[in-house]
Image (cartoon, rainbow, N blue to C red):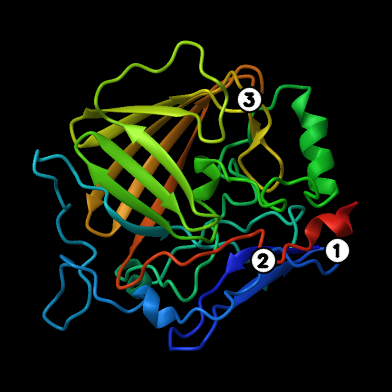
Amino acid sequence: MLHLFLFRRSNPEPGIRRCCEALVTVAFVILGTPLASTHLSAQWIKYPTAGVPRKADGKVDISAGTPRMADGKPDFSGVWMTGEPNVRRTGSLSSPKEAPGPREPQSPSAEQSPGDASAITASRQMANIGVDLPGGLPYQPWLVPIVKERTDNLAKDDPHIRCLPDNFLRAYGLPHLLKFVHTPSLLVVLNELNAGYRQVFTDARPLPEDPTPSWQGYSSGKWSGDTLVIDTIGLRDDTWIDWNGSVLTEAAKVREQVRRPDFGHLEIQVTVDDPKAYTKPWTVTLKQRIVVDADLIDEICLENEQSLKHMK
């Protein structure tokens, strides 16, 4: 199976198609293909992002102050990619059986640079979202053999491989760009993979009492100082949140505490309370890094999708 988790963008010149770096697991199956004949230059790949703070030498100052909306609250608008792109030990992470290596410090130059849209990688949490939790995720007994089976069979039933939508927690760690569009009453997150979207309402609306389960759930946010606290319910049962096959269920309550400490970074502290799937609530931090002078590109998994016929 060829899992296209690590997508890369080719040199954005006319007639040059985007390319991808694949992860090899068992057999060769194509999940997606480069765009047919669209000129990348027509999609504003190198068009300068407005309002980017720069140093005297012209480099992006990602440590500059936090952008703010008219009401004074932090503005999360921007194009983002994972801020913790270290999934490698030697070579590429090629299987959910291969645990990510320990967190490694990034070089000072990398820490002070925006994300590189031509070399997008995945986070360490892509394969196992609880990789940094002592003892790992606190699975309920019924879930333990299921996760083991999914890991052992190389995640052949992964909804991502079948071109279904990725849950927002998982999207933070996958190698695809996310675009945040932020207004005082609404935060919209656009996922370039399959043109996905998520809405977070910040107009103080209550969460629904009996929600119809959905891929992204129902999200309502409120401010606590400069932190946006987002509560989400109403997710579908068996919603995958990592490559190992860890899940959220309909019982899940997810709280995100989102901060933008400076121009170039987002910090998202996530607490999952899902008594059906886990023995206790657990908390992880998922980081994002700004990407400038770039924008989303169509990345439609179902175009020339070849996986299902090989998995039958």
Image spot of residue 89 (x, y percent): 64, 66
Q: Which residue is mark 3?
A: 249
Q: Is residue 162 left or right of residue 218?
A: right
Task: Tell me the CA gap for discs 3 and 2.
Answer: 28 Å
Q: Nearer the viewer, residue 237 or 263?
A: 237
Task: Identify the amino acid type marked 1.
Answer: Val
Q: Secondary structure at mark 1?
A: loop
Residue at (42%, 64%) from the top-left corner? 296
Q: Is residue 81 left or right of residue 202?
A: right
Image spot of residue 301 (x, y percent): 63, 60
Residue at (64%, 23%) from the top-left corner? 278
Give whichever of discs 1 and 3 has the lower sequence position: 1
Give whichever of discs 1 and 2 has the lower sequence position: 1
Task: Identify the amino acid type marked 3.
Answer: Thr
Q: Is residue 158 left or right of residue 165?
A: right
Q: Residues within 10 Å of mark 2 (few under 14, many from 20)?
A: many
Q: Which residue is mark 2?
A: 32
